[in-house]
Amino acid sequence: MTNIALELVNITKKFAHAETNSVTGVSLTINEGDFVTILGTSGSGKTTLLKMVNRIYESTSGDIFFYGENIKKLKVEDYRRKIGYVIQQIGLFPHMTVEQNIATVPKILHWNKEKINARVDELLKLVGLGDEHYKKRYPKQLSGGQQQRIGLARAMAADPQLMLMDEPFGAIDAITRQNLQDELINIQKKLNKTILFVTHDINEAFKLGDKIIIMDKGEVQQFDTPYNILFHPANDFVKQLIETENIINRLKVLRVENFVQPLTQPTKLADGVIHNDKFLDDVLAKFFETGKKRLVVIDDQEEPIGEISWDQFIQLKKIQDNVVRLDVQKKNIRRVNDHD
Amino acid sequence: MIMTNSIADFFNYFGEYHDDLLIMVAQHLQIVLTVLAISIIIAVPLSLVLYQSQLLSSIVLAILGALYAIPSLAFFAILIPICGLGMPTAVTVLVVYVQFILVRNTLAGFKSVDASILEAGRGMGLSKLQLFVKVQLPLALPSLLGGLRLAVIATIGMTTIAASIGAGGLGTLLFDGLRMDYAVKIVWGTVLAFLLSWAANRILLIFERRSLKKSRGELKTAIRN
């Protein structure tokens, strides 16, 4: 049975002097080890929701339970030390070296020196800055991407059970962002952390999330797997959101493992295979290369775990057709408006 | 001829009265250091309180600014009936003046700390005290020290006026020189006060620049082998 890491019950936030709620009646459950992305536009309440989890904001009503404990009953500092927090502005301490930045929470927790040093080395290696000379550098002497790697390492210093990430790669150039996303996926697979990751980038949300929370106007529109969101959008808002992306772009961020179907017929590896950590654009390429209508999906041990079929792509195509129609409608509306 | 005589007089005065001069320098420093110690103890917590409220800080800064604008002699005169002549009155007045400089700079220092740095610190579970000691104070320190340097120079200057109410210090030389129409005393008073300010400025600048480099992460670190 999986543990429930986080449970939100009817969470609402209304800021003082605000006319409307920023977040209204959000209830959801996040299992241990889930990588959940929160997708929404600015003003959708996604960041407010995240910041209520580590009590940077206090909820106006409702309760949040962290491994069954109501977070309002926990001492806020102790609670936050169990949670890694990464923000878009990174927020490294400029007067401290990389090493000192990462060691901040372990020092507060009174770890001994050897344990701290070992942890710093381990984390720097994990985030790809293992070279000895990085430890003594100041944040200013690092690039933006490197700084956020350190931000990530610092957040994981005390081995938190939960990671909260608020658009961590939002201010980083596209190529570096892709690398960081890939590495975050690897880190999450390796360490099985529970991650809540806020983003306004639909590709990022689909690429990273095992599950996606789609928010609009302070409410959860859909909380589901990428697959279900694409094929069973809960309402018109979600439908429109997923239709705004070019289909090929969408294929690039959909992981094969989210689309695996049970095997429908006995496996022959000669049928053509695809690894489950690939993306759907790789699958499409494979379909064209092999001329097959069905590929066997294999895992790390090269064991077949299911299949993926051409028919699933036809469904994606149907969604794409809707997009074209919608675009034409929009253009017509715009043209009408232009005449006014 | 007159010129050489004057220079000779100037040095002869030191030969004869160097003990008195040193005592006056010591008195002067005593007043300045007392003022600064009290001022810092008041200004840092006060700035922290004002940091929480924009409204409160503009009110308090306006009041401190108004007090700063009162001429020092008038301020002494107002306080003499309450605190009497001498050091206590001088120190009180100077502490009030220095508050304006120190609070303004310290507050600016706290405000200059990037909000995202504080949020990251809070988010990782630093308590208010830890956040203050580990993050806010080191980052606000250059501005705080800049204010302190200005305050020291202003205090050294204003302390000379405090001699008019019998607080002692280098101002005694100036007022005596004026009364006796004895230029040598006036020049010694001026030179010593200048040297004190200059030395204080140089020394505090070293600390200020160091703290600025530290806060920006520009200090060279020793690479351990």
Image: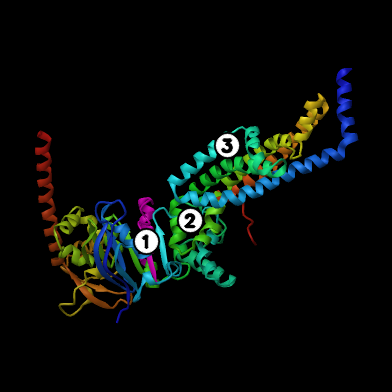
Q: Quarter-wise, where is residue A302 in the image?
A: bottom left
Tell me the kind of residue under disc 3.
Answer: Tyr
Q: Which numbered disc covers residue B68?
A: 3
**Residue A116: quarter of image:** bottom right
* Image quarter in which the C terminus of chain B is found: bottom right
Amino acid residing under circle 2: Leu
Q: Is residue B146 visible?
A: no
Residue tagged by mark 2?
A92
Q: Nearer the viewer, mark 1 or mark 3?
A: 3
**Which span of residues is magenta-colored?**
A161-185
Q: Considering depth in this image, is A276 or A8 the residue closer to the camera?
A: A8
- Percent coordinates x, y for residue B196 in the rendering: 74, 38
Output the chain of dot 2: A
Left/right of residue B223 with respect to residue A16 in the rendered view:
right
Residue found 40% across the figure and 57% down from its top: A87
How far across and how far down the image is residue B108, in percent? 51, 44
Residue at horizontal 25 percent and vertical 51 percent from the top: A19
Residue tagged 1:
A165
Separation of residues labelled 3 and 2 (CA atoms) = 38 Å
Mark drawn on residue B67: none
